Image (cartoon, helix red, strand yellow):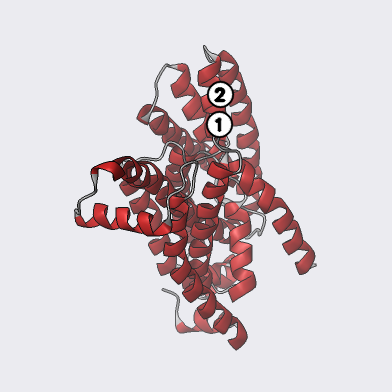
């Protein structure tokens, strides 16, 4: 916890921004549950919101379902609810990790994948597929590859200097993508190749209730830790020398942020694949609404990310039904013009 002088060094947001922040948080907190219910009901087999809410209530309270409604209940509770919850968790986690990564390297163009985590996860998943594994083994391989890539970047960067970390992460990512391409070429059959390639573009089709608790603990726990560090993140943005003068150990803080974002991103990529642009664009949108103070950004950004990713999942399931589009493709199509618009506004 920095001394009081550190808090005085970080300017408070204007009152209008504080009002915008409160309004946005309240609106998102109210609309997110509604969006989840609507998203669960949408798909190739549409289910009215009232029926969806009834099935969810029955599942949560142990209620009974009529025999002719069992199929729709299974669609709601077994298939769609896990993937919508996973989409919300991944969206919130990517947004929070993006905020942390941009503070870590003091670069507004940074995102959670800059450490080579997504490329490492892809290599791990493809390697597991090459060995004939499937299901949870691919997920485990992806997580191991993600964390391994982050460790390699840390060792190769020889420290946590922001510019060195960014350049090393980019270089390692390119190398891992080349390795992944070779492994994909060596995969034994086209069906496995298609599955792996779809996974590398991101999606929530493999969601299940088995993975939700693990992802929830990692993501929500990581967001909680980042919120506790909110004032230190403000001080870190002023530079290492200023942070040291204000009582913040910049190197120790960077090391903790590095480990935390690597763990969060690795867990998310392992279950959803690499979904780009969410961790880059959502923090900028949050700052536009609420200012740069991390106490506010770290509340608004996860809510924005969760709502955005729920909508992305709905689009992935419905735009080309009965086929499913990769979530990473949709986030790129939305994120690129949005990011360019934000850049133009800042200029």
Residue most toward the front?
A: 68
Q: Residue at x 30, y 45 (%)?
A: 69
- Name, please, the residue furthest toward the top: 188
- Secondary structure beneath dot 2 equals helix
Tell me if label 2 and label 1 are in contact, CB under 8 Å.
yes
Q: x, y percentage for residue 290?
A: 58, 75
Q: Quadrant of residue 48?
A: bottom left
Q: Along the line of sight, which residue is nearer the eye, 226 or 287?
A: 287
| Residue displayed at 60% across by 56% down | 105
Mark 1 is surrounded, within 10 Å at the Cα level, by few (under 14), some (14 to 19) or many (20 or more) other residues, namely some
Q: Nearer the viewer, residue 268 or 71?
A: 71
Question: Residue 240: x, y in percent?
Answer: 58, 65
Question: Which residue corresponds to the image point at 49% horizontal and 45% vertical from the top-left?
Answer: 43
Which residue is labeled 2 in the image? 194
Q: Is residue 113 above or below residue 181?
A: below
Of the numbered discs in the image, which one, if any, rests on residue 291? none
- Residue 148: x, y in percent? 46, 35
- Nearest the eye: 323 or 338: 323
Residue reaching furthest to the bottom: 15
User: Which of the 4 image quadrants contains residue 133?
Assistant: top left
Dot 2, how many residues are within 10 Å of its Cα: few (below 14), some (14-19), or many (20+)?
few
Which residue position holds label 1?
A: 198
State the separation of the CA atoms marked 2 and 1.
Answer: 6 Å
Depth order, front residue of 146/35 = 35
Whether residue 316 can be seen here: yes
> In the image, what residue occupies the spot 32% across and 45% down?
73
Residue 248 in sight in this render: no
């Amino acid at each position: 916890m920095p001394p009081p002088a550190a808090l005085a060094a970080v300017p408070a947001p204007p009152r209008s921004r504080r009002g915008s922040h409160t309004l946005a948080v309240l609106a998102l907190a109210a609309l997110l549950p509604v969006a989840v219910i609507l998203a669960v009901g949408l798909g190739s087999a549409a289910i009215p919101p009232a029926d969806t809410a009834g099935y969810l209530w029955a599942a949560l309270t142990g209620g009974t379902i009529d025999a002719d409604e069992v199929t729709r209940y299974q669609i709601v509770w077994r298939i769609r609810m896990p993937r919508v919850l996973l989409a919300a968790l991944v969206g919130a986690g990517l947004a929070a990790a993006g905020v942390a990564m941009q503070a870590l390297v003091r670069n507004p163009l940074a995102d959670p994948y800059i450490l080579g985590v997504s490329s490492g996860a892809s290599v791990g998943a493809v390697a597991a597929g090459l060995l004939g594994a499937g299901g949870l083994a691919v997920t485990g391989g992806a997580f191991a590859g993600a964390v391994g890539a982050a460790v390699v970047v840390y060792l190769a960067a020889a420290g946590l200097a922001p510019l060195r970390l960014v350049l090393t992460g980019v270089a390692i990512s390119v190398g891992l993508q080349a390795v992944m391409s070779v492994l994909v070429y060596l995969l034994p059959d086209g069906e496995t190749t298609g599955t792996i390639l779809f996974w590398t573009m991101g999606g929530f089709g493999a969601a299940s209730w088995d993975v939700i608790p693990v992802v929830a603990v990692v993501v929500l726990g990581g967001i909680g830790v980042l919120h506790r560090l909110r004032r230190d993140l403000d001080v870190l943005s002023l530079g290492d020398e200023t942070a040291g003068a204000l009582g913040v150990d910049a190197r120790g803080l960077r090391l903790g942020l590095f480990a935390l974002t690597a763990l969060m991103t690795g867990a998310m990529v392992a279950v959803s694949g690499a979904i780009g642009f969410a961790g880059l664009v959502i923090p900028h949108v949050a700052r536009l609404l609420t200012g740069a103070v991390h106490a506010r950004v770290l509340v608004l950004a996860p809510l924005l990310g969760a709502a955005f990713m729920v909508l992305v999942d709905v689009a992935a399931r419905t735009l080309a039904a009965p086929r499913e589009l990769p979530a990473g493709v949709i986030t790129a199509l939305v994120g690129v013009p949005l990011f360019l618009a934000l850049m133009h506004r800042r200029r």
